[in-house]
């Protein structure tokens, strides 16, 4: 019985989402699935507490996508990637790295040796 209820629920969800034709699908409910895709997207984080810094921008107009993203690497350098994608050229990316890497020096700790384990 549960399988029948699940199947009917899935069918109703598909019809309501417009993935299957319904009895009420006339011109007033027509959905153009071949509309020209176009968008602009921006995202960014700058957290002074954790040091997390990154950003991303992307735009699309039809089948042409252009964008870039950047992030601060653990060594302090900035990695920036510029990319494009289209039907003719495929996906292309150019990676840039800027800044100077900073590596912390290891801290030397003296470990005390117990006299009972130390032999001359």
Image (cartoon, helix red, strand yellow):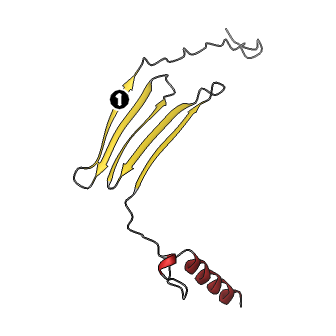
**How far across and how far down the image is residue 88, in percent?**
22, 53
Element marked by disc 1? strand
**How far across and how far down the image is residue 68, in percent?**
40, 38
Residue drawn at 45 percent across, 40 percent down = 57
Q: Look at the picture and state if 69 lies above or below 101.
A: below
> Quadrant of the image for the N terminus?
bottom right
Give the side of residue 101 with respect to residue 3, left or right: left
> Quadrant of the image for the C terminus?
top right
Residue drawn at 48 percent across, 31 percent down = 71
Q: Look at the picture and state if 85 lies above or below 27.
A: above
Residue drawn at 44 percent across, 26 percent down = 78
Q: How many labels does the image show?
A: 1
The foreground one among 7 and 29 is 29
Residue designated by label 1: 96
**How far across and how far down the image is residue 24, in percent?**
55, 85
Residue drawn at 65 percent across, 13 percent down = 109
């Amino acid at each position: 019985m549960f399988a029948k209820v699940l199947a009917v629920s899935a069918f109703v969800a598909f019809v309501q989402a417009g993935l299957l034709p319904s009895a009420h699908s006339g011109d007033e409910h027509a959905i153009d699935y071949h509309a020209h895709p176009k968008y602009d997207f921006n995202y960014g984080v700058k957290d002074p507490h954790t040091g997390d810094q990154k950003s991303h921008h992307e735009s699309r107009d039809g089948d042409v996508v252009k964008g870039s993203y950047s992030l601060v690497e653990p060594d302090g350098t900035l990695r920036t990637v510029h990319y494009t994608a289209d039907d003719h050229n495929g996906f292309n990316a150019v990676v840039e790295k800027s800044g100077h890497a900073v590596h912390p020096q290891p801290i030397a700790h003296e470990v005390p040796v117990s006299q009972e384990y130390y032999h001359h």
